Image (cartoon, helix red, strand yellow):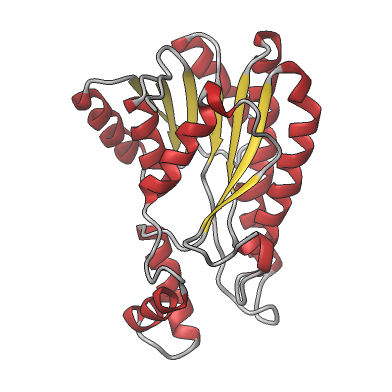
Amino acid sequence: MDISLEGKTVIVTGAGRGIGKEIALMTAEAGANVLLVARSAPQLEDVAAQIKDRGNGRALAHPANITEKPAADEVVKRAVAEFGGLYALVNNAGANSIANLVMSKEDDFRAVYEVNLFAVFRLTKAAVRQMIPARSGRVINISSVAAKFGSAYNSAYSSSKAAVLGFTKSIARETAAVGITSNAICPWHVDTELVREAMARRAKIFGKSADEYLQGIIDESPQKRLIDAREIGALSVFLMSPEARGITGQSLNVCGGMMME
C-alpha cells in the first residue's frame, strides 16, 4: 500500500532525534508538510535539511519549549500560517525520571508530567480547534507499554504515559463524529539515544554496566531485540492515512511481543 500525505500538514514534537525524527522523515517521505518541534534548533535544522535532500514533502524547524503555556498556540499558528490548515499532530516529545519511589522528588515528577501530559493536553486542544472546521484530522500520541504494566523505578514516566492513554480515548470519543481520530502508540524499548541514556541510569541502581543492563532488556524480549524507531514511524504514517479512519481510541503496542493484549 502506497500511502500519500501529499499537501497534508503535520506537526511532530520531539522531532530532533530518535522516534520523532523518524516519524518526521517518514511523514515527509509520504509527501506531507512537516512542522518540526523541539528545543534544539540545530537538531531540527539537521532533520529539515535531510527532508529537503530527500526531495519529498517540506519541513520547517520550529524550536520551542512545549512546557511553556503559550507554546502550543504558537506551534499550531505557525503550522497553519506556513502550510495552511492542519491535518495531524504527533505528540512524541517525552521526559523521564529514573528513581525509586522513596527517593523520587515531587519536582521531578511534575517536570515529567509537564512534558508527557500537560504539553500533550495543550497542543491537542490547539490542534483540534483547527481540525474541527475541516471535519478531518489525526491525533497520534506516543505513549508506552510501561503505561499498561508499569515499570519499576520509573513511576513518573509510567503514570504520565498511562494518563495519556485515558486522554487519548476521551478525545477519540469527543471528536469521532467530526472525522478526527485519536490514537496512542505504545512502544517498549526503542533503540534510540534517549533509551540508551535511561538504561545507563537504571544500570547504576543495580550495580551493572549500561551494556549489561541493556542486554538484559534484549534478553527479556520475545523477539530478542530492541524496536527500531522506523517501526513507530511506519505505524504513525499508516494512522494518518485514509485507510485508518476507522481506527480511533486505540492504544497500539509496538513491543516485540512484550505485551500481547
Q: Nearer the viewer, residue 116 or 87?
A: 87
Q: Note whether 217 is above or below 118 in the view shown.
A: below
Q: Note whether 65 is above or below 4 in the view shown.
A: below
Residue located at (55% from left, 11% from top): 85
Is residue 189 visible in the rendered image? The answer is yes
The image shows a total of numbered marks equal to 0
Q: Position of residue 169 (x, y in %)?
A: 75, 41
Q: Position of residue 47 (x, y in %)?
A: 30, 35
**Quarter of the image holding residue 247?**
top right
Residue located at (47% from left, 77% from top): 220
Q: Position of residue 109 (x, y in %)?
A: 67, 62
**Quarter of the image holding residue 127?**
top right
Quadrant of the rendering where the C terminus is positioned: bottom right
Direction from residue 94 to residue 39 in the image, left or right: left
Q: Nearer the viewer, residue 253 or 203?
A: 253
Direction from residue 95 to residue 175 in the image, left or right: right
| Residue furthest out toward the left | 53
Residue located at (66% from left, 74% from top): 104
**Quarter of the image holding residue 184?**
top right
Q: Position of residue 210 (x, y in %)?
A: 36, 79
Is residue 69 visible in the rendered image? The answer is no
Residue located at (44% from left, 84% from top): 204
Direction from residue 135 to residue 229 in the image, left or right: left
Q: Note whether 127 is above or below 93 in the view shown.
A: above
